[in-house]
Image: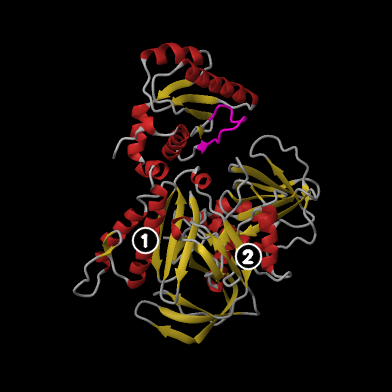
Amino acid sequence: MTRIEWTRTEPGDIEHLVAMLLCRENPAATHIRPSRGDGGIDVLVPADDGSGIIVYQVKSFHSNLTASQKAQVERSFHRLVDFAKAHDLKVLEWYLTLPLDPTTENLLDWLADLTAGHDLTVGWRGLNFLDGLAGTYPSVVDYYLHDGKERLQAALESLTAVLRMNLNTGSSASEAGAPAPAPTGPLAASEAVEGLASLHAALNEQDPHFYYDFSVDTVRPDVPDQPGLVAAVQHGDDTRCITFKIFARCNASLVERPVPMNIKITADPDSDLHGDIQVFEKYGKPLTTPAGSTEGNLDLPGGLGGAFTGGSISIGPAKDAGAEPYDLRLQLLDQTDALLTETLVHMKPLTTGLRRRGVRAHGTEQHGAFTFEALTDLDAQTSNISLGPTDLTGGVPSLLLPGLRLLREFRHPNQLRVAAPFGATTAAPLGIPDDIALDPDAGTVFDLVEALAIIQEHTSTQIRVPDLTKLTHRDARRILYAAEVLRGEAISVPWDVRTVHLNPGAGPPPTEPVTMLLFEKLNISVNGARVDLGYQQVHLPAVRIDLNSLTNHDDHQDVRIVPVGGTPAIIRFAPELPVAPS
C-alpha cells in the first residue's frame, strides 16, 4: 500500500482518519465529536474489565512541534483531567496520537512534565504507529482520503448483483464479479465452496464500516441476535431464501454511516400487533410484524436497502445508553410475609422506548425456569410485572425446582419481592393482583420436574428434563408413579387381574384365597433411555388363583390371579430383592 502523504492532507481529514483507524483497532471505542464539552477526548475506549477508560488525544501535527501546538495539547490534557474529576471517570491510559514520531525531548521532558502526578499510563502514538494502522485497515484510508466512497458503493452494488445471481442460479464464481467456467457435468456442492468464499472475501474487502455474511437455504432461517448485527435482509420464493446479514465493524460505524429508515406498519386498533407496537414505542421491547403488514424504505449498507411493500420487519431491543446486564433476586412470600421460595434472575440490559417514557426490564431465571418482565410507565409511575414459561428441555430437574415453584405460586394473595442478589432484603413486597393470568400448566410441569428430581436421587444416570411437548401421557404417568413409590410411603393401588410365575418345586396352587408378596422391577424411560430404579414390593392381601389358567413352561408355570373382594394392592419401594432363606 502507498504510504499516506500526511503533509499534504488537510488537518481535519487527518484527525477524522486517525480517529476511525483507532476505532477499527478498538471496536468498542467511541469517536467524540469536537465540542466545548468534549473534555479533551477524541477517542474513548472502555477498559475490558470496566475499571476505567483509555483516552486518545488526536492531533494533525506532522512536523516538529511548535510552542503553540504544545500549548494546544496541554489545554486538551488539562480539560481531560478536569472533565474526569467532574464526572467521576477513572482515566487509566492517555495517548497523544499524531503522524509524528517523538524526539527524546518530547518524551522525557515536555510530555513527562505535563502528565506527572496524575496516576495514569501515558504514551505517544506517532507516525510509525499510524502507518501500521493504515496498512492494517487500507479500506479506511481509501474511504476517507481517496475516492473510496464512490468505489465502495459501485463495488458493493456489483458484487451484490453477482452474489444474488450466483445463489439463485446455483453457479459459482472464480473471482469477484466473474462467473466460473461452466462445469461439464452436474455441479457438486464442493465445487461451489471456492467461488462462494471468493465472493465473501470480495464483498468484505472495501467497506470500512460494515462486513457482510450471506447464506442460501431451502427454508427461511430465523436470524438470532448477534454482536454487531445491524440488519438482516431476506429474499425468498417457494424454492429458496437468500439471507444477507450486515454487521458493524466497530461502535463508530453507525455514527459514520447511519442507517435511516422510513417504516409504515398497518395494524387494526384492536389487534395484537397494535398492542405490540405500543409496547415497542413505550418500552423498547423487540417488535416483529407479520408478513404483509409492513412497507417502507431502508437505506442499508451494501445496496441491500430500498423500498419494499407487503413485507415484515423485526426490530431488536432498544438498549438504554450505558445499560449493562445485571442480576435480581426474586422472593415469593405468602400473606404473612413468610418466604415460600426465591431464585436469581439474569437480567438483560434495560431498554427504553422511542420517546423514553417507559423502561423494560427483562431476563431469564438462572437455570431457565421462567422469563421475567417488568414494564415501568414513567408517566403513570406504575409497573407491570409478568412471568412466563420457557422450554425446559435439557434442564437439570433439581436446579429448576425453585424457579418452577415460584412460577407455580405466582398468584394472589402471595407477594413478590425484588431484591439485590446478595445482602439484606429491605424492599417492601409487591402484592400480586387477583386477576393475574396464571399458567395453566405450571402445576403439572412442576410435579413432573419434581418427580424427575426425586428419581435422580436413586440413580447414577444423569437425568435431564425431556421435551415435555412430546412426552406421552403414559410416560408422564410412569414418571409420577415411580417418584411416588421412591418417596417411601405405602401406596394403595386398585388392581384387576395379574399373571404370576410359579417356580419349579412349588406345591400345588391352593384353592382358597391367599396373601401374596411380589417383587417387580421398577424402571422408567426418559429421553429414550431406560433407567432402572430397583424394585417395588407388591403386597396383595387377598388373592384367588385361577386354576383353569395354569400354563406349563419348560422352567416354570404361569397362572392368573384375581383380587378377592376388591382389595387393593399395597406398593412399597424395595431397593433390592430380599435374600431367600437357605
Q: Nearer the viewer, residue 570 or 100?
A: 100
- Residue at horizontal 56 percent and vertical 33 percent from the top: 34
Relative height, residue 533 to residue 374 (above, below)? below
Classified by dominant secondary structure, the portion drawn in magenta counts as loop
Residue 369 rendering spot, x and y as whole percentages: 59, 55
| Residue 250 x/y as whole percent | 46, 43
- The answer to if 557 sits in the magenta stretch is no
- Vertical side of 531 occupied by 44: above or below: above
Residue 470, compared with residue 385, is above or below; it is below
Color scheme of the displayed model: secondary structure
Q: Amino acid at mark 1?
A: Ser
**Front residue of 173 and 421:** 173
The magenta region covers 30-41
Q: Is residue 337 left or right of residue 301?
A: right
- Tell me the element at label 1: helix
Q: Left or right of 581: which side holds 370?
A: right
Dot 2 corresponds to which residue? 264
Q: Residue furthest bottom?
A: 548
Q: Quadrant of residue 411?
A: bottom right
- Other-residue count near label 1 (Cα within 10 Å), few / some / many at <14 / 14–19 / ≥20: some
Would residue 37 be counted in the magenta stretch? Answer: yes
Tell me the element at label 2.
Answer: strand
Q: CA distance from mark 2 to mark 1?
A: 29 Å
Residue 158: numbered disc: 1
Residue 529 position within the rendered picture, expressed as x and y whole percent measured from the top left: 43, 64
Query: Does the rendering let one see residue 346?
Result: yes
| Left or right placement of residue 331 versus residue 488 in this view | right
How many labels, in total? 2
Three-letter code for the amino acid on which mark 2 is drawn: Lys
Judge left or right: residue 24 versus residue 312. Answer: left
